Image: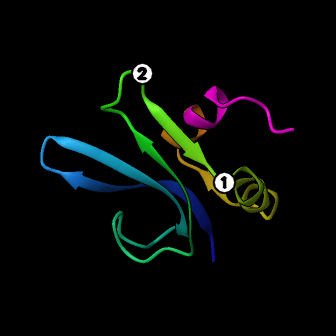
Amino acid sequence: MAVKIRLARAGAKKRPYYRIVATHADSPRDGRFLERLGTYDPSANPSKVEVNRPRLDYWLGVGALPSETVARLIKSLPAAT
């Protein structure tokens, strides 16, 4: 089964907050997920991204495909040490 890394919406109306999750490709956006990898708060100034980098690297290593938005967020993060 294909695994994707994508955003799952949380938060209140007009105050979006997202969880970065590893999930099956055919699962609903806010449905069940395999693992929560981090959070993204676009309302903060500047936007706030927190990621469990070792787990993100694991999922990418086993072939999980990030969504376009998650790929952009990953590129904006500092390199893992």
Mark 1, other Cα within 10 Å: few <14 / some 14–19 / many ≥20 = few
Residue at 65% of width from left, 31% of height from top? Answer: 77
Marks 2 and 1, Cα distance to the nearest angstrom?
A: 20 Å
Q: Secondary structure at mark 2?
A: loop
Residue 46, numbered circle: 2
Q: In this figure, which colouring scheme has been used for the structure?
A: rainbow
Residue 72, numbered circle: none
Q: Which residue is mark 1?
A: 52
Q: Residue furthest top?
A: 46
Q: Position of residue 32 (x, y in %)?
A: 42, 77
Q: Quadrant of the N terminus?
A: bottom right
Q: Between 4 and 79, which is closer to the camera in this rendering?
A: 79
Q: Position of residue 40 (x, y in %)?
A: 44, 43
Q: Quadrant of the C terminus?
A: top right
Q: Quadrant of residue 10?
A: bottom left
| In the rendered image, the vertical position of residue 7 relative to residue 3, given as above or below | above
Q: Secondary structure at mark 1?
A: loop
- The part of the chain drawn in magenta is 73-81
- In the image, residue 7 lies in the stretch drawn in magenta: no
